[in-house]
Amino acid sequence: MSFGDVFIGWRLWQALGLDEFLDARIERGREDVSWSLVAAILALARFCEPSSEMHIADTWYRGTALDDLIGVDAELVNKDRLYRGLDALLPHKEAIETHLRERFVTMFDAEYDLILYDVTSTYFEGAAAGNPQAQRGHSRDNRPDCKQVCIALCVTREGLPIAYDVFPGNRNDVKTLEDIVNGVEKRHGRANRVWVVDRGISSEKNLAFLRARGSKYVVGTPKSGLRRFEAALLESGWSEVQPGVEVKKCAGEGDDETFVLCRSGNRREKEKAIHARFTERIEKGLLKLESRLEKAKRAVERVGVERQIGRLLQRNQRGAGAFNIVVEDDRGRAGGLRVKWVRDEKWAAWAALTEGSYLLRTNMNDWAPEDLWKTYIQLTQAESAFRTQKSELEIRPIWHHGEKRVQAHILISFLAYAMWKTLEMRMSRTGLGNGPRTLLNEVAKIKVSDVILPTTTDRSLRIRCVTDADAAQRALLDRLGIEMPKRLGVPRWTRAKM
């Protein structure tokens, strides 16, 4: 039976105080298993081996030693109880966020002066017809064919989760910020915080909203914002903040804001390759279209050709501005039309100037450009949180269809991520790197086996023993300050087989 990974998960659950907090928070009824333990089972499964509630009940739980570890018999773990556990947990979402905030302060001296905010999406398998939040929208998962919900997440500078919210799948990113800011300040107070958000959220309305509340911010701006600073891009005065990355501070139109130009050598090469790839695709598409027009045996409708060009440019937007395209009449052809195009030299010059460059905007005018860049670049922590939830904790796809069940599923993923990040922080602080999955795979090799001792009666004594850790596993556990037990539970009498 699996033991090492679930034991680590259970210790993390206890370290976060979620066992005692939920046991006191969720009112007990006549249920055979407390809802706090059901929540633990769901979060441990998402942490160790993400799967459906049916798989947890039918296979996963029975293959672990959790029955002895947490005292819940495998026969009591079924999909209906797990579903009801989701329902019992969801009303306590905000209290859980507040509890975790306090716990992170105790465990890691976490600071909440800087909040990194980002939005992602996760998609459904199935129609989800009864869920008003399940809508089609911009899919970060490249699944525009599926309905989705949007998830907005706030984390600290270290990536510790603070709060999240779930929005309809067609909700524009810019329309999420006010709800999130109000929710965070309601639960955690309106302290002197700095909000760091990406360009997809930094609308003029949102920035005015933050300024009106006295909030500080560092935000990315749309690429088009570089037009205002074309001269500054060409001038000297850049400072290197790390090899290959330079920044320059620029004044805004008034005294209340400052802009920071940034440029990266690695990013420049990446964007150059992207532009080359898309322009090549467009040119190949235009050549094929022109070839078809040349070979056409009958008249071709102009509107159809223009639609084909529009679709080609839509599919390759990053290179669409590189061409000036016209559809001309040509009486010498049976099709009657010809496509001509030329490269737009102004677009090419602007692309070459701005490749690798981006613009930051802030109302903290006394900060050095180097500090503003370092603050903004920490948004990678929010992006990393989404990657972990999608790849390691498999928050997608969503198989639930009911609105509340979907939100409870995301809450379980949030709790599993809190456990994941706690383990990652402990590993980092003890010199074990920052790869929780590698560590979990290693300790998962520690199993539980039953030792059966026969007696002179018709019964045998079953003792559940934990296999010895090898040298590498012991080193990992010692660094984390975790000691594995030798045995689980108490010896049990079993009937001898006839």
Image (cartoon, helix red, strand yellow):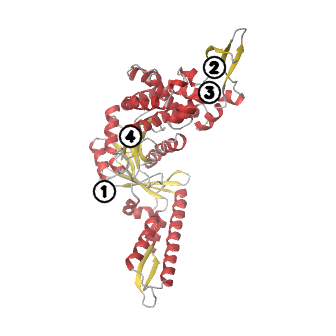
Q: CA distance from mark 1 to mark 2?
A: 65 Å
Above-or-below relation of 199 to 410: below
Q: Secondary structure at mark 1?
A: loop
Residues tagged 4 and 3 counted as in contact (Cβ below 8 A):
no
Nearer the N terminus, badge 1 or badge 2?
1
Q: CA distance from mark 1 to mark 4?
A: 49 Å
Residue sitting at x 40%, y 64%:
230
On the image, numbered disc 4 is attached to which residue?
A: 402
- Residue 423: quarter of image: top right
Residue sitting at x 68%, y 26%:
474
Above-or-below relation of 320 to 381: below
* Neighbour tally class for label 1: few under 14, some 14-19, many 20 plus, Cα within 10 Å: few
Q: CA distance from mark 2 to mark 4?
A: 41 Å
Nearer the N terminus, badge 2 or badge 3?
3
Q: Position of residue 259 (x, y in %)?
A: 38, 53
Residue 253's label in the rendered image is 1
Residues tagged 1 and 4 counted as in contact (Cβ below 8 A):
no
User: In this image, 115 relative to 15: left or right?
Assistant: left
Name the kind of residue labelled 1 in the image.
Glu
Q: Is residue 410 visible?
A: yes
Residues tagged 2 and 4 counted as in contact (Cβ below 8 A):
no
Nearer the N terminus, badge 2 or badge 4?
4
- Observer-nearest of 326 and 490: 490
Farthest residue to the left: give it: 212
On the image, numbered disc 3 is attached to which residue?
A: 3
Q: Secondary structure at mark 3?
A: loop
Above-or-below relation of 61 to 374: above
Residue sitting at x 48%, y 51%:
141
